[in-house]
Amino acid sequence: MSTKLKHRSILNRALLAGTAIAGLAMGMSQTLAADPIVIGLTSDSSGQYANSGASDRRGMLMAIDEFNAKGGVLGRKIETVHIDTETTPATGSRVAERMISRDKVGYLIGAVSSGVANAISQVAQKHGVIYLNTNSSSPTESGANCHRVKFVWDGNGANFAKAAVKNTIASYGKNVIQVTNDYGWGHDTSAATKALIETYGGQVSEDILVPQGTRDFTAVLLKIQQAKPDIVAAAVGGDDLKALRSQVAELGMGQDYAWINNQQDWPDVYGLPKENLFGVFGTTWYYGLDLPGVDEFVAQYQEAYPDTQMRVPGNVFYNGYWATRSLLEAIEAAGTTNNHEVIKKLEQLRIPADVRMQHDDAYMNPNTHQMQQTVYLATANTGSDDKDDLFTIVSHSTPEDVADTDADASCKLELLEDTPVNQP
């Protein structure tokens, strides 16, 4: 073979090899671009908040399905991993560590128990993984236990107490007994409530602590009957609250005192008789609100979950949905999954009232990472035979009226530059 032909042969092989390498690189690039975004769902399937955990996940998944139906986010499909956090902080910590280290999740979403949420958020901050606390509501979650990667989507105990306490004392009297679940959320919520009771001229004569998992409230109710308070302020949640409400109703005590249940999660009362829904209680959303988009949202829920026993969505579902939707929208707005850029977008978040189906615009407090939103007070809807229409909304308060100023004072977010960079 001539030298000229030999050089041409070598050149052709080089060109072919280069083309093959370029094609391989392009294929790898396309494969990498198509890699899914994996979200870890850190919600309970067992324990005190199992029902709320299931509702929370349904909200997250409906939002994810919406985005996947239109091609995902940044051209990437969204996939999920779920592990039961068991309403236990130690389990929450292990689940978060496993999801980040082994399952390579890019984001974490979920929680009802504030103790679990706090445990998850510590792991998330260590790794720089954005974590959305969907439904736990201890004031410390956006206060002393805040983190740069954590965003809190529910109203907290201070918000709900501000909506309820002043009017209740003015209407019913000043002598108050508190009934408190004996863990972080209960303690923090009762402390916020007590401070407001004293601010408005009331007095807490006793704070009765109730261990998690309590099913017999006989001793608690006997103490209340003996003390004869004007008001009972309860910070009890999950299955414990179902048991308390049922036993109060059985004894006919629901009308004997003015009951304030700081917050009423829909899964805690759905299916209960309406006589069990005594007193007033706080919520962030109700499917019976006469606002734009609500009917369509309910119809979407029913189409997505036709076999679910809970036939209408509640506040827990709503929070799970909106946290997830807002995260995915923030990634789209940032044009990247880089956690620092997505954090910046979430800190600037503002959602018009008519989009979010509330009475007021909702917005993220950049100093505490808690969503500021309308807070509603409700009571039993005894005027309807519809078994799903349990609540009557009696008032709503603006985000400014119920703002938790103590959280602003106690929250010390880590600097963004001190938060590990993470780009899933």
Image (cartoon, grey):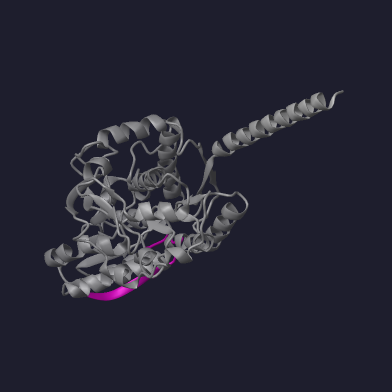
Q: Per the image, is 279 magenta?
A: no
Q: Residue at x 23, y 52 (%)?
A: 374
Q: Quadrant of the N terminus?
A: top right
Quadrant housing residue 230: bottom left
Can residue 363 be spotted in the picture? yes
Can residue 133 be spotted in the picture? no
Between 293 and 20, the one nearer to me in the picture: 20
Judge whether 333 appears above or below 372 on screen. Answer: above
Q: Position of residue 413 (x, y in %)?
A: 39, 67
**In the image, farthest residue toward the left:** 171
In the image, is 391 to the left or to the right of 28? left
The magenta span reads 202-217
Between 19 and 37, the one nearer to me in the picture: 19
Q: Position of residue 133 (x, y in %)?
A: 41, 55
Q: Residue at x 50, y 56 (%)?
A: 129
Judge whether 391 appears above or below 303 on screen. Answer: below
Judge whether 69 appears above or below 408 on screen. Answer: above
- Total tally of numbered discs in the picture: 0
Q: Position of residue 214 (x, y in %)?
A: 44, 61
In the image, is 177 to the left or to the right of 79? left
**In the image, farthest residue toward the right:** 1
Q: Position of residue 64 (x, y in %)?
A: 44, 39
Quadrant housing residue 352: top left
